[in-house]
Amino acid sequence: MRRRVSPEVRGSTVAISASLNARQRQAVEHGDGPLLVLAGPGAGKTRVIIHRVAHLIESGRAEPGRILALTFTNKAAQELVGRVHDLLGESIGSDVWVGTFHNTCARILRESAVALDIREDFAIFDQESQDAMLVECLRHASLPADLGDVARLRNVISARKSAMEDPLDGDVSLPDGEDERVLSQPGFLDALRVAIEEYERRLGEYGAYDFDDLLKLTVERLQSHPAVMAKYHAKFRHVLVDEYQDINYTQYELLRLVAPEPYRITAVGDEDQSIYSWRGSDPKWVRRLREEMQPTVIELDEHYRSTRTVLHAATELISRNERIRETALKTNNPVGEPLYAYALANEEAAAAHTTKLVGLLHREAHFAYRDIAALIHPDKCSEANASEAFKKVSYGVQIRYS
Ligand SMILES: Nc1ncnc2c1ncn2[C@@H]1O[C@H](COP(=O)(O)OP(=O)(O)OP(=O)(O)O)[C@@H](O)[C@H]1O
Ligand SMILES: [Mg+2]
């Protein structure tokens, strides 16, 4: 059955799609085959996803409830939901399955729990509750404070589950990049295993899954329950993935399960923006998609977000990366304010200079403090040092660290 968007929504779809550039329009109107859209930041990749969803519905190629749009963080998912609702109206927009990989898996597991042989009333541990439990597990394993780091334990568990492995199978190992000092501590890996055992035991006791379990379990159960898998194949006519560069092994597997050949998949991403390498995401998944699914590849080259000056500086910086972007971004935006770069001798001098600039911006240019942001590289400048420097100029103004 063909479901049409309301005339009023259709009107806005047409109006907004008129503001797509030629390459964006080509992506939005691409047929049913696999599609890979690559571009740097602010080139309208998310816009392509949203408009393609609208176009699929409007052209009658997919009903709203048969479209799945995926991303990685709750914040990105909220943005996607908001933009889909803005474009399609809430009544149609809310039928589209839009969410993170994790909450989509939770939804599949919940609605098909009986058929997938799992309990329906499972609990989900988000990162906050997971970390609270990991603290207790580290204590249980008597790991010394400097070694018993919650983020490390979380990453060890997450890396194994993201590779579809049981974190307790075989040797406990640390992801690449851990320093030798940690590894060489006698008994460290054994203690880590005790902590992981305790963590898994407690999850079982609560009838709970962490985020990585949700993905792993969904993939495993769909693989072992072909009838349920067939239901989702039939359901999802189109699957779209924003921020594809952040995908990992389990998520890639899930994608193949819900959208197998002929791969009605639209993936948009930017290899230079990958932020989850510790979770197993890797540019190789872009290569894999290209090789396995043979998608049409469209590169967007117009940048809409920043001024020409900012774009130029960013392009200069990333031109020093090992991986060179094939298509450079251009923009029609104004030149904008100049950028200033200061080379300072050390951490203290950098912190002092930054605070001086903040003071100047406030006093001379009359910017409110709340409109000033200072980004600190945690490896180069400690928060304690920065905070000490800011205290000197802030005269009691509250500084928010995030
Ligand atoms: N053709 C266009 N005409 C006018 N504005 C556009 C166009 N394409 C995108 N934009 C605007 O540019 C901004 C960036 O777009 P969008 O968020 O889709 O980019 P992106 O490539 O997904 O960025 P990121 O890499 O940060 O995720 C948005 O405000 C969007 O509305
Ligand atoms: Mg985007």
Image (spheres, rainbow, N blue to C red):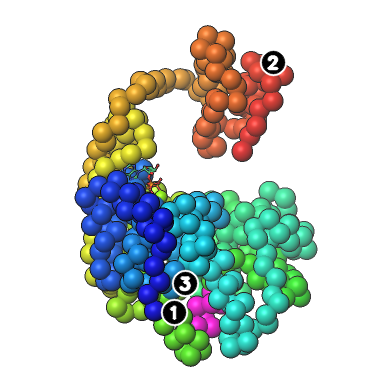
Residue 89 or 226: which is nearer the viewer? Answer: 89
Q: x%, y% of residue 299?
A: 24, 52
Which residue corresponds to the image point at 47% horizontal and 52% vertical from the top-left? 86
Label 2, label 1: how many angstroms apart (C-alpha)? 60 Å
Q: Position of residue 253 (x, y in %)?
A: 43, 74
Q: Amino acid at mark 2?
A: Tyr
The three-letter code of the residue at mark 3 reads: Gly
Tag 2–tag 1 contact (CB < 8 Å) = no
The image's mark for residue 362 is none
Main secondary structure of the magenta stretch: helix
Q: Is residue 218 magenta?
A: yes
Residue 341 lies in magenta, yes or no?
no
Extent of the magenta region: 216-223
Q: Nearer the viewer, residue 74 or 5?
A: 5
x and y percent of residue 370 in the render? Answer: 60, 26
**Image quarter in which the N terminus is found:** bottom left
Of mark 2 and mark 1, the one earlier in the sequence is 1
Kindly indicate whether the residue at mark 1 contacts the one at mark 3 (C-beta within 8 angstroms). Answer: yes
Q: Amino acid at mark 1?
A: Lys
Taking the view exactly as shown, the residue that stands out farthest to the top is 364
- Provide the residue designation for mark 2: 395
Viewer can see residue 142: no
Q: From the viewer's perspective, is residue 20 above or below residue 109?
A: above
Identify the residue under disc 3.
65
Cα separation between marks 2 and 3:
55 Å
Q: Is residue 147 left or right of residue 331?
A: right
